[in-house]
Amino acid sequence: MLLTEIDHIAIAVEDLEAAIAYYCDTYGAEVEHREVVESDHVEEALIKVADSYIQLLTPHGDRGPIKKALERNGEGIHHIGYRVDDVAKALAAVEAQGHRVIDKQPRPGSRGTTIAFIHPKDAFGTLIELVQE
Ligand code: CO
């Protein structure tokens, strides 16, 4: 099994502060990490739930995939991040099965991780992110 854990569930939101306040005030959650990922035009806040995260994502700037997703689908679940031991190996396994990927090569993600996205069209409508810590 290449997937070792659910790393995060990513949720696209219009107002990051409001979404953080919702999780903190309602569930007593705490933000463990915040980061602007310039290359993805996104700002994130990570809320830990057991060994996984809720990743709240909002656009940083006026373009990028989260901006597009909000315009197209509104707020809600954007992708699921699965932890893997080796992104390059997992990516190769997906391609070897003839499934489309978005990232041909592993690339840097937030918090120093290495990531790659798999194409949702071949993954039953779910955008999958492989995450190596
Ligand atoms: Co993610």
Image (cartoon, helix red, strand yellow):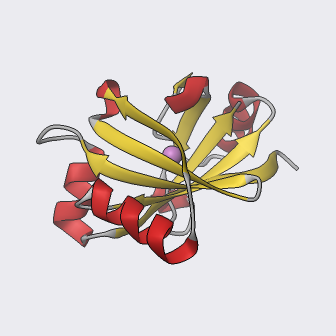
**Horizontal and vertical percent for residue 39?**
32, 25
**Horizontal and vertical percent for residue 88?**
69, 26
In the image, taking residue 127 as reference, residue 75 lies left or right, namely: left
Residue that protrudes farthest toward the right in the picture: 1
Residue that protrudes farthest toward the bottom in the picture: 26
Residue 106 visible in the current orientation: no
Q: Compared with residue 127, is residue 39 higher up or lower down, i.e. above or below?
A: above
Q: Nearer the viewer, residue 15 or 133?
A: 15
In the rendered view of the protein, which quadrant contains the C terminus? Answer: top right
Q: Nearer the viewer, residue 78 or 102?
A: 78
In the image, taking residue 122 as reference, residue 40 lies left or right, namely: left
**Horizontal and vertical percent for residue 128?**
56, 53
Q: Residue at x 37, y 51 (%)?
A: 57
Residue 38 visible in the current orientation: yes
**Horizontal and vertical percent for residue 65?**
28, 46
In the image, taking residue 85 as reference, residue 12 lies left or right, namely: left
Q: Compared with residue 1, is residue 88 higher up or lower down, i.e. above or below?
A: above
Q: Nearer the viewer, residue 60 or 87?
A: 60
Q: Compared with residue 105, is residue 125 higher up or lower down, i.e. above or below?
A: below
Q: Nearer the viewer, residue 91 or 66?
A: 66
